[in-house]
Image (tube, rainbow, N blue to C red):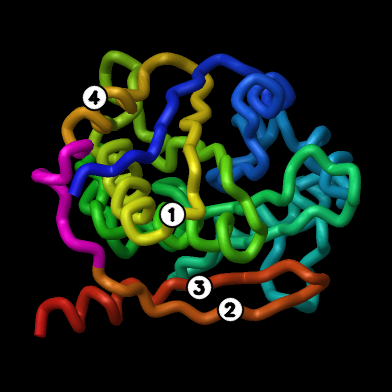
Amino acid sequence: MKSNLNIRHVPGLDLQELIRKERVDCLIADSEDGFSQLGKAREFLSEDLGYADTSLLRYMVEGYPDRLEASIGQLADWCRARSPEITLVVIPSRRLDSQLKGLILSPYDGAKSYLQFANGEYARPHKDFFYSVTWEALYQAVYRLGSRHPALTHMSRIRTWRNEYKWEGTYCQVEAALNFSDEHKDLLDLSFWDPSHGNCVAEAVRYFCDGKNRSHHRPLIHYSTEQWGIHFVTINLKKCLADESL
């Protein structure tokens, strides 16, 4: 099936430019903080969404919900450190005048939950991990936060020798987005937000756009809990893979 989803690649913009130029209404970001896209945008996100901007260096997050705080820095730390569960953090805006409907923090290949699927530091990205996280993040963005124009960061932080992102991760994310669009027409467009031009989004879209190279989507098993109005959505990927092999 050929998807009509418009997928744009918009590297090099700061978050406020991205929102203004690309009509972005929600951000799905990998949970790498510090010198990263999320880290650079954290102050703006905290103010726009109505959350305290607590320093990620304040303390180590070891439990949920006893020591966790409703701040983007602490939630990103928790998301990145959670293992072995693959959990997305769905953060709705608390402000009526927010430019974004919300933020979704996702695991990525630097998160501890990815270690159970990794085959080595420079191995090819695990397709099921990247695909499933992207699909669930889009589902939560559209149906939990009401987004129609989300932006997505690249979930593979591993670079090639040319200092470009591992292209396989992009292909997994694009395939998930196109398959999601086939089933859920409420997603109107998607922006890949990158710090540089090294991501091969256009090539991946061309590869999958006619539907011939895409795999069939299998339903994901997930459950969610809520704290402070924030939803913590966990994917049981190992159970999905085990059921697929039967």
Q: Is residue 50 left or right of residue 78?
A: right
Task: Return the x and y of residue 165 as percentages of the image width and height.
Answer: 34, 27
Q: In the image shown, does 174 or 157 lie closer to the viewer?
A: 174
- Compute the Cα span from label 1 to label 4: 23 Å
Label 1 or label 2, whichever lies nearer to me, is 1
Q: Earlier in the sequence, mark 1 or mark 3?
A: 1
Kind of residue at disc 1? Lys
Residue 206 within the segment the image draws in magenta: no
Secondary element at image label 3: strand
Instruction: Please identify, in this view, whether the residue under mark 4 or under mark 3 is nearer the observer.
Output: 4
Amino acid type at mark 4: Glu
Compared to residue 3, the image places residue 135 above or below, namely below
Which residue is found at the position 55% from the left and 15% from the top?
A: 12
Pair 1/4: label in front = 1
User: Mark 4 highlights which residue?
Assistant: 203
- 217 or 12: nearer the viewer: 217
Kindly identify the amino acid type of the residue bearing the numbered disc 2: Ser
Disc 2 target residue: 224
| Residue 177 in picture, x, y percent from top left | 37, 47
**Which residue bears the numbered disc 3?**
234
Q: Residue at x 53, y 21 (%)?
A: 195
The image's mark for residue 185 is 1
In primary-sequence order, the first of circles 4 and 3 is: 4
What's the residue at 25%, 70% (across, down)? 218
